[in-house]
Image (cartoon, grey):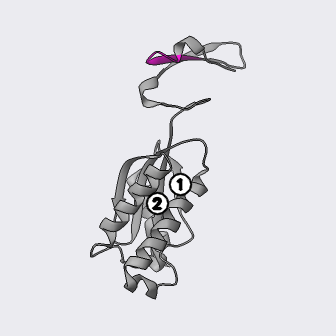
Amino acid sequence: MVILKPECLQKSFLVVRLRLVRQCCQCYTINMKEHRFDRHAVHRIRYHLVWVTKRGKPVLIDGVGERLHEIIDGVAADNDWRLLHLTVRENYVRLLLEATPRRAPYQIIHAFKSRSSRKLRGEFPHLLKLPSLWTRAYYVATADGVCEETIRRYVEKHGGR
């Protein structure tokens, strides 16, 4: 059982008390400055997202990558998401995002991929040669514990299709 004291929500730290099965208690101090406050929720949801271009083609070059960066910034701002880190390479996109609990991860990735594909293919005609800009696949993980090796393996596996 998690006990949240309402008077602590206004302070910078919140003590959460967890009762375990053996009736012993552990207290954790959570830095509330890292959390976001909505009307009925206190949250800190961070996703690590990666998606690859169709067939792993290096098409995010010559201004396309810079424009993609602007589009992703716009999608995040429109949905009240915070971009913590964004990397655009010639054949994949990797970002660390702080989201709200209102949207599932698949909805978040869909928002980025659909708007960016539509706008980029309209602005850069050479992208129309591909059947689609992005693969259907994507990688999502909570932000804790994602290492470079995991991302590299994902891009290698899905970039060559």
Q: Position of residue 42 (x, y in %)?
A: 55, 29
Compared with 54, 149 (above or below) is above
The residue under the point 53% across, 60% down is: 111
Q: Is residue 42 left or right of residue 159?
A: right
Q: In the orientation shown, which residue stands out farthest toward the left?
A: 62
Tell me the crowding category of disc 2: few under 14, some 14 to 19, or many 20 or more residues within 10 angstroms, Cα based: many
Image quarter (top left, top right, bottom left or bottom right) of the N terminus = top right
The magenta stretch is 9-16
What residue do we see at 44% from left, 88% from top?
129
The span from disc 2 to disc 1 (Cα, nearest Å) is 7 Å
- Secondary element at image label 2: strand
Residue 24 appears in the rendering: yes
Return the residue at label 1: 140
Any mark on residue 50, and which? 2
Circle 1 SS class: strand
Q: Position of residue 133 (x, y in %)?
A: 47, 76
- Where is 135 relative to 142, above or below? below
Residue at image position (51%, 35%) is 44
